[in-house]
Image (cartoon, grey):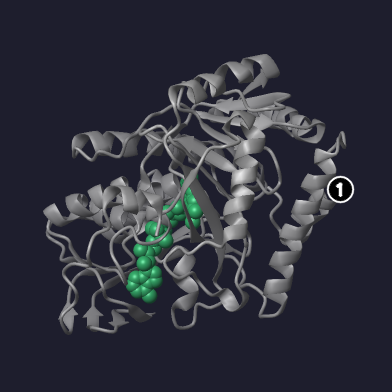
Amino acid sequence: MSFWWADRGRPEPDDVLDGDVTADVVVVGAGYTGLWTAYYLSGLRPDLDIRVVEQRFAGYGASGRNGGWLSASVTGGLDGYARTHPRADVARFQLAMNDAVDEVIAVTERHAIDAEVRKGGTLLVARNPAQAERAQAFAAFGERWPEVGVELLAADAADRRVRVAGTRAAVWEPHCARIHPARLAAGLARVVRERGVRIHEGTTVRAIAPGRVDTDRGVVRARHVIRATEGFTANLAGERRTWVPMNSSMIVTEPLPADAWAAIGWEHFDTLEDLAHVYSYAQRTADGRIAIGGRGHPYRYGSQTDSDGDIDPRTVAHLRAILVSWFPALADVPVAHGWSGVLGVPRNWRATVGYDVASGLGWAGGYVGTGVTAAHLAGRTLADLVAGERTDRTTLPWVDQRARRWEPEPLRWLGIHGLYRAYGLADRIEARGARRTSVIARVADRVSGRVS
Ligand SMILES: Cc1cc2nc3c(=O)[nH]c(=O)nc-3n(C[C@H](O)[C@H](O)[C@H](O)COP(=O)(O)OP(=O)(O)OC[C@H]3O[C@@H](n4cnc5c(N)ncnc54)[C@H](O)[C@@H]3O)c2cc1C
């Protein structure tokens, strides 16, 4: 289980479904996507009987395990969307994500959810020449898309924000806040329950069909059925190849002493990432720890999901080594906790939200590791769609994105492991001083369809 739940206190499943029921709306999955959908829909239509069905407890999945980056990053990339959609719509998408960051913060304030929010932006550091080249490319991207707010920082300016060893340049973006993931999930669950939404925890859904959801505790019949299961989607009947469950892993240190913080100089609470292909991401927690995450073991054969966030010792050692390479002063820092989680990746690497009026089926997810803010916008959009309201959100480019299904095994396993091996190799070549982004990474981007 994640440090966040250990810190907050892990809830016991509550309000388990007790036999068959009929409602107006049933949402499968009580992560951020399901909870935000319930939050906005109960606000728009207080008359509706809304049920959320959750196999364990609200926030059990990635929403209670993530790095706590409330980031405005658009999964799939603005340039990628600009190839298929009008530029103005793509810019509107970015602005909607920027607003979503502030709206999440406003909701936490409105409902006294203590999610330990600090909006300090994001710092992406370049630590070798090829990464510095990518920082330059990022700056050029920022000129094409001023909505992102990209600032290119020289090494000394980057060091003034956070002193990461070997920084050659960095990129800073303003639209990101640090949060405590489990506190946000628990707070949202409390608020939606206060609004009369029933969250049936400890209830596993086996299959979803128009008008009904079959669980191990009974059938929920409803006109509107929303799938919000993200990285766990492959476990549902008929969904094995819809989105692959990709692993991401994290460790958190013990609280750092004041002199360690002084050595690092991480005063603005920026979230922090490197510009490696297999990147690592970190936050400074409210109680003075560093939580850092990275890919670890990327994918389990047959789209298996995890067991309660287990992590292997090799991944812990790997993440610790990255942390120490960023901050050599932390060579002796003890690791307090490590865990893993699953996130959903569609074949086109683009997140999606959609609702089919005829069948009453809706879905959202496939956020590819940047879902904390996107789940908010997706849930709010689903609420609009179910309520039958046409808004600025319901016409954004990601609405109704359809990706083809993933390849069957063993191709899926071979492809994903091959991809991450290629990125890892590209990182090692670049770390030895290559001046340009490795051709291996460029080819991997093209072959995987991940290019943005
Ligand atoms: C380690 C890690 C770090 C990450 N870091 C970041 C980050 O810093 N910033 C960022 O933007 N994104 C991050 N992400 C991604 C982000 O956490 C997710 O995109 C987001 O939380 C997805 O929310 P969700 O509600 O769609 O899915 P989830 O939170 O996974 O919720 C799905 C829920 O559905 C339930 N469920 C699934 N199947 C069933 C079923 N059959 N029956 C009943 N219930 C079911 C699950 O138990 C779960 O509670 C990270 C992910 C991981 C794993």
Taking 298 as reference, is 354 left or right?
left
Instruction: Report the number of numbered marks.
Output: 1
Q: In the image, ligand 1 is in what quadrant?
A: bottom left
At label 1, which amino acid type do we have?
Val
Q: Quadrant of residue 237?
A: bottom left
In percent of the image, x 49 and y 82: which residue is there? 238
Q: Picture quarter containing residue 387?
A: bottom left
Q: Nearer the viewer, residue 378 or 431?
A: 431
Residue bearing mark 1 = 439
Above or below residue 195? Residue 108 is above
Q: Which image quarter is the N terminus in?
A: bottom left
Residue drawn at (30%, 69%), measured in percent from left and top? 56
Q: Is residue 112 above or below residue 161?
A: below
Residue 327 placed where, x, y %? Answer: 61, 31
Q: Position of residue 6 (x, y in %)?
A: 33, 53
Q: x%, y% of residue 417?
A: 71, 66
Few, some or many residues within 10 Å of mark 1 (<14, 14–19, 20+): few
Drawn side of residue 108 relative to residue 75, left or right: left
Q: Residue at x 47, y 44 (%)?
A: 252
**SS class, disc 1:** helix
As drawn, the residue found furthest toward the front would be 332
Q: Can residue 359 be spotted in the picture?
A: no
x 57%, y 53%: residue: 316
Tell me where residue 248 appears, x and y as whole percent: 55, 56
Q: Nearer the viewer, residue 371 or 299?
A: 299
Displayed quadrant of residue 17:
bottom left
Q: Left or right: 137 with respect to 339? A: right
